[in-house]
C-alpha cells in the first residue's frame, strides 16, 4: 500500500515546492517600476539621476518590487510599458509626439507615475518649450516655470494632506535636503483636481541665498509635492543636488535621499502607486 502511494507523495511534494517557489517569487516582485532619464544637462540633475539609480534598487530589494531604468525615451511605447505598473521621470520629459501619446495613454489607463524636479520644467523660448498642454496644464496643473531659489538650500516642508498614503506616518513638518525650489505659472490652490501634499513652511524663510534678490523667497505659498486626483501620480519638486560649481570641480555637496523623512515620503508614494488596485492596460 505504501509503495502505491509513493508516486502520489512525490507529485504532492513536487507540486508543493513549485507553488512555494512561485509564491516566493510573487512576494519578491510585487510590481515593476521603470525610470526614464536623460542626465545630460546640469550637473545637479545628473548627480540626482546617478543617486536615484543607486538608491531605488536598494529600496526595491527591501520592499519587494523591481526597478529598471533607461535613457532611451523610445522605450516609452505601449509594448514596452506593458510590464510596468509605475513610470518615473527622473529629470526630463518625453519630447517626441509618439512618446508623449504613449505616456498619456499609460496614465489614462491606470498606470502610475512619479516625477522629480526638472521633469515638470517648461519655459517658452527655451530648450524645453511649453508645447505639451495636456502634460503641463492638465496632468501636472502647474503650467510654465516662473522662477527658482538659489543657491540650493534645505527647507522645512509642511504636510498639507495628512490623509494621503504618501504622507502616512510622517511628522507634520519634515526637513528636506538642499534643493533648487521652483514656483509656477498656475496657482495650484485654485485647481480642484490638484491635491497639494506638501508646501514650504514659513519657518524656511528666507529661502535661498542669492546672489540675486529674486532668488531669495521671503514669503508666499509654494506647493512642492502634489497629486492629480484624476490620475495615479505624484510630482516632487525635489531632485536638484547642491554642487560645487564655484571651484570648477562639480563636486556633490548634498544628496536628495540623505533626508530620512524625504526618503520615506518617496517610498510611501511608490508603494501607493505600485500596490494600487488599478492596473495599466495598453491602449493601442
Image (cartoon, grey):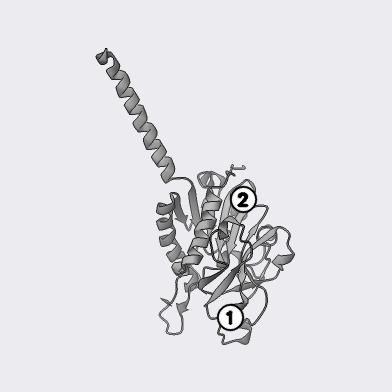
x%, y% of residue 132? 67, 60
Q: Using the image, determine if residue 175 lies above or below residue 235.
A: below
Q: Residue at x 63, y 59 (%)?
A: 227
Q: Nearer the viewer, residue 108 or 191?
A: 191
Q: CA distance from mark 2 to mark 1?
A: 34 Å
Label 1 near label 2: C-beta < 8 Å? no
Q: Quadrant of the C terminus?
A: top right
Report whether residue 39 is seen: no
Query: In the figure, 78 relative to 223: above or below?
Result: above
Left or right, 61 with respect to 117, comes to left
**Residue sticking out furthest to the left:** 3
Label 2: element kind: helix
Per the image, label 1 sits on a secondary structure element best described as loop
For the point 52% across and 57% down, which residue is it?
268
Say which quarter of the image contains residue 198. Answer: bottom right
**Quadrant in which the N terminus is drawn:** top left
- Per the image, the residue denoted by label 2 is 107
Say whether residue 104 is left or right of residue 187.
left
Q: Earlier in the sequence, mark 2 or mark 1?
A: 2
Q: Which mark is residue 221?
A: none
Residue pictured at 67% horizontal, 77% vertical: 220
Q: How many neighbours does mark 2 have within 10 angstroms: few (below 14), some (14-19), or many (20 or more)?
A: many
Q: Nearer the viewer, mark 2 or mark 1?
A: 1
At label 1, counting other C-alpha atoms closer than 10 Å, the crowd grade (few under 14, some 14-19, many 20 or more) is many
Residue 56 in the image: state x and y as whole percent. 44, 58
Residue 278 screen position, x and y as percent: 59, 44
Q: In the figure, is residue 101 to the left or right of 9?
A: right
| Residue 20 x, y percent position in the rendering | 37, 35
As drawn, is 10 to the left or to the right of 209?
left
> Which residue is labeled 1 in the image?
207
Would residue 235 be visible to someone looking at this image?
yes
Amino acid at each position: 500500500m505504501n509503495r502505491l502511494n509513493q508516486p502520489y507523495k512525490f507529485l504532492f511534494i513536487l507540486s508543493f515546492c513549485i507553488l512555494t517557489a512561485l509564491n516566493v517569487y510573487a512576494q519578491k516582485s510585487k510590481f515593476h517600476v521603470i525610470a526614464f532619464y536623460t542626465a545630460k544637462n546640469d550637473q545637479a540633475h545628473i548627480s540626482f539621476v546617478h543617486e536615484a539609480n543607486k538608491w531605488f534598487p536598494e529600496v526595491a530589494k527591501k520592499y519587494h518590487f523591481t526597478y529598471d531604468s533607461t535613457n532611451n525615451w523610445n522605450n516609452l511605447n505601449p509594448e514596452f510599458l506593458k510590464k510596468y505598473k509605475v513610470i518615473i521621470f527622473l529629470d526630463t520629459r518625453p519630447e517626441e509626439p509618439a512618446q508623449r501619446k504613449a505616456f498619456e495613454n499609460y496614465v489614462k489607463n491606470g498606470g502610475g507615475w512619479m516625477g522629480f524636479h526638472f521633469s515638470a520644467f517648461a519655459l517658452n523660448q527655451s530648450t524645453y518649450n511649453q508645447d505639451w498642454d495636456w502634460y503641463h496644464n492638465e496632468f501636472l496643473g502647474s503650467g510654465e516655470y516662473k522662477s527658482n531659489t538659489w543657491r540650493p538650500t534645505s527647507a522645512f516642508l509642511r504636510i498639507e494632506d495628512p490623509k494621503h498614503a504618501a504622507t502616512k506616518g510622517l511628522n507634520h513638518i519634515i526637513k528636506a535636503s538642499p534643493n533648487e525650489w521652483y514656483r509656477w505659472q498656475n496657482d495650484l490652490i485654485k485647481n480642484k483636481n490638484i491635491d497639494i501634499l506638501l508646501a514650504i513652511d514659513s519657518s524656511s524663510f528666507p529661502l535661498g541665498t542669492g546672489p540675486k534678490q529674486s532668488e531669495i523667497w521671503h514669503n508666499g505659498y509654494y506647493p512642492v509635492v502634489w497629486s492629480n486626483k484624476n490620475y495615479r501620480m505624484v510630482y516632487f519638486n525635489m531632485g536638484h543636488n547642491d554642487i560645487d560649481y564655484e571651484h570648477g570641480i562639480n563636486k556633490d555637496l548634498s544628496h536628495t535621499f540623505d533626508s530620512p523623512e524625504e526618503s520615506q515620503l518617496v517610498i510611501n508614494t511608490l508603494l501607493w502607486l505600485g500596490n494600487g488596485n488599478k492596473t495599466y492596460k495598453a491602449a493601442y
